[in-house]
Amino acid sequence: MSKLFVVPTPIGNLKDITYRAVEVLVSAGLILAEDTRQAGKLLSHYKINTPVLSHHMFNEHRTVEAICARILSGTTIALISDAGTPGISDPGFLLVRTCIEKGIEVETLPGASALLPALVNSGLPCERFCFEGFLPPKKGRNKRINSLADEARTMIFYESPFRLVRTLEDLAACFGASREASVSRELTKIYEVNIRGTLETLAGHFRDHAPKGEIVLIVAGKK
């Protein structure tokens, strides 16, 4: 029976993919990719020749019904994002929800995600945590940060290198400059960096050393 497979892909190092994920991508009738050019690098590396169709936040509302119709007509489809697990700060939720509503089987494979390696590597408590994704760049930003002021669990944020210093400063203003935190950059890649300290010291470091690449910010909860 045809179904939707949600397939995690490497967040940097192309070796960080499971045997099963490769098997699914090879056997699927169609691969939906957030960026077909980015997907092409991975698929070429593993000699996967399955047809690829673009599926991203700007077209998913227009195409979701047609995709479901293809699955219902007998095509097994695999969904991938540029990196990590689809649906986690990436396209995927809408398609998964629509498939479920239409009675289409959805199977999500385990695999790469930036948030867990960054959390464990931070040295901060990880038995309880909350994932906050990207903070709003403008509207609603202060409200969202203030809502976390009393959060006791370790917090995980994704951030752009262009907004990292501002985010560290905003969090320090709300949580206190001495709150412990960790910044992980370019996880699994050759230039991976993990820096730990207080929100204040991390803001100072990245003011002097402009960050690049994908960033995960881990912040200790309120004691």
Image (cartoon, rainbow, N blue to C red):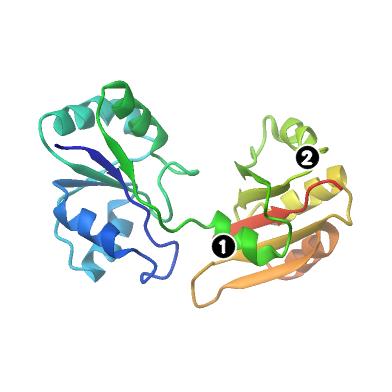
Neighbourhood count class around disc 1 (C-alpha, 10 Å): few under 14, some 14–19, many 20 upward: some
Q: Give the quarter of the image for residue 116.
A: bottom right
In the image, is residue 119 above or below residue 71? below
Q: Which residue is mark 2?
A: 151
Position of 220 compared to 81: left or right?
right
Q: Residue at x 87, y 48 (%)?
A: 223
Q: Residue at x 80, y 51 (%)?
A: 169
Query: Which of the pair 138/130 is nearer the observer?
Result: 130
Q: What residue type is disc 2 on?
A: Glu
Secondary structure of the residue carrying numbered label 2: loop
Residue 67's disc number = none
Q: Which residue is mark 1?
A: 117
Query: Which of the pair 137/53 is nearer the observer?
Result: 53
Q: Give the quarter of the image for residue 87.
A: top left
Neighbourhood count class around disc 2 (C-alpha, 10 Å): few under 14, some 14–19, many 20 upward: some
In the image, is residue 95 above or below residue 206? above
Question: Residue 128, image x and y in percent?
Answer: 68, 47
Most extreme residue toward the front is: 127
Query: Which of the pair 47/124 is nearer the observer?
Result: 124
Are circles 1 and 2 on residues that touch, CB within 8 Å?
A: no
Q: Residue at x 69, y 30 (%)?
A: 140
Query: Which of the pair 130/95 is nearer the observer?
Result: 130
Q: How many marks?
A: 2
Position of 124 compared to 216: left or right?
right
Question: Residue 63, image x and y in percent?
Answer: 26, 30
